[in-house]
Image: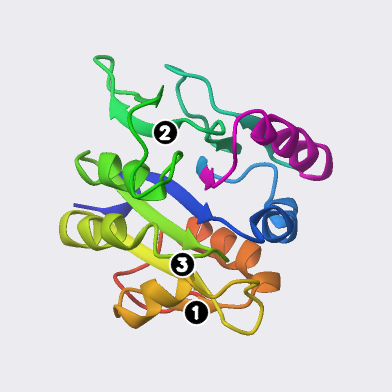
Amino acid sequence: MNPNKLLPIVCVGTSTGGPRALQQVIPLLPKELGAPLLIVQHMPMYFTKALAERLNAISAIQVKEAIDGEKMSNGMAYIAPGDKHMTLEAGQDGDRRIIINQEPPIKGLRPSYNILLQSIAHLTGVNVLTVTLTGMGHDGLEGIRLIKDRLRHHAIAESETTATIYGMPKAIIDAGLADDIVPIESIGQTITRWVERGYGNGNESIS
């Protein structure tokens, strides 16, 4: 299938140190970015709305806390609400819709990056860029492995040189799943290149 016929989706997962990292990534993205972003930041209830508003104020793209049932749009970033899981499903009209729920935490995490990625892995007609930033633990590892087995996919992991906590990106790198290892100041540009180049070519480096 021609990759340009696929729906591009950018997924970002982060935990400890994430708000600061996101402020170094999201403002660098162009207003007309040809893909939606789905962001999982490990945070408790109420904090993610303030994070979304802060990022929106300093970014060209629009950033908002995700709402259950809404359709994704290019040039929009959707942050999973604190203490709720965010997933993606195909609607009857062919659009992909964001679903918000309070299913049990996964390994103590809600929202869970793995839950988002695993839901995307069961979709068709999509091409996925995963971006794993600073954070404790290995949330996202299982989801990225599943996506790589099923979909066209490219994985970026934040480098150890800039990660506040080198847990989440290290897990992706150690498992051999990272296609690019990128310092935080270059990740925004790398995301933009992935979108502009027709969503990459296989596992070649885009950094």
Q: Amino acid at mark 3?
A: Met
Asked if one can make out residue 198 in the rendered structure from this viewpoint, the answer is: no
Residue nearest the viewer, comparing 194 with 88: 88
Residue corresponding to mark 2: 85
Residue corresponding to mark 3: 168
Give the SS element for disc 3.
helix
Q: Nearer the viewer, mark 3 or mark 1?
A: 3
Marker disc for residue 181: 1
Q: Is residue 149 magenta?
A: no
Against 167, is 142 above or below? Answer: above
Classify 10 Å Cα crowding around label 2: few (below 14), some (14-19), many (20 and above). Answer: many
Residue at x 36% of width, y 78% of height: 204
Give the SS element for disc 1.
strand
Question: In terms of image quadrants, where is residue 105?
Answer: top left
Tag 2 or tag 3, which sits nearer the N-term?
A: 2
Question: In terms of image quadrants, where is residue 54?
Answer: top right
Label 3 – label 1 distance at C-alpha:
12 Å
Q: Position of residue 69 (x, y in %)?
A: 42, 16
Question: In terms of image quadrants, where is residue 28?
Answer: bottom right
Query: Is residue 172 toward the left or the right of residue 57 in the image?
Result: left
Q: Is residue 48 magenta?
A: yes
Q: Please provide the residue range marked out in magenta.
A: 39-59
Against 47, is 8 above or below? Answer: below
Q: Amino acid at mark 1?
A: Ile
Marker disc for residue 132: none
Q: Position of residue 50 (x, y in %)?
A: 75, 33
Residue nearest the viewer, comparing 110 with 67: 110
Classify 10 Å Cα crowding around label 1: few (below 14), some (14-19), many (20 and above). Answer: many
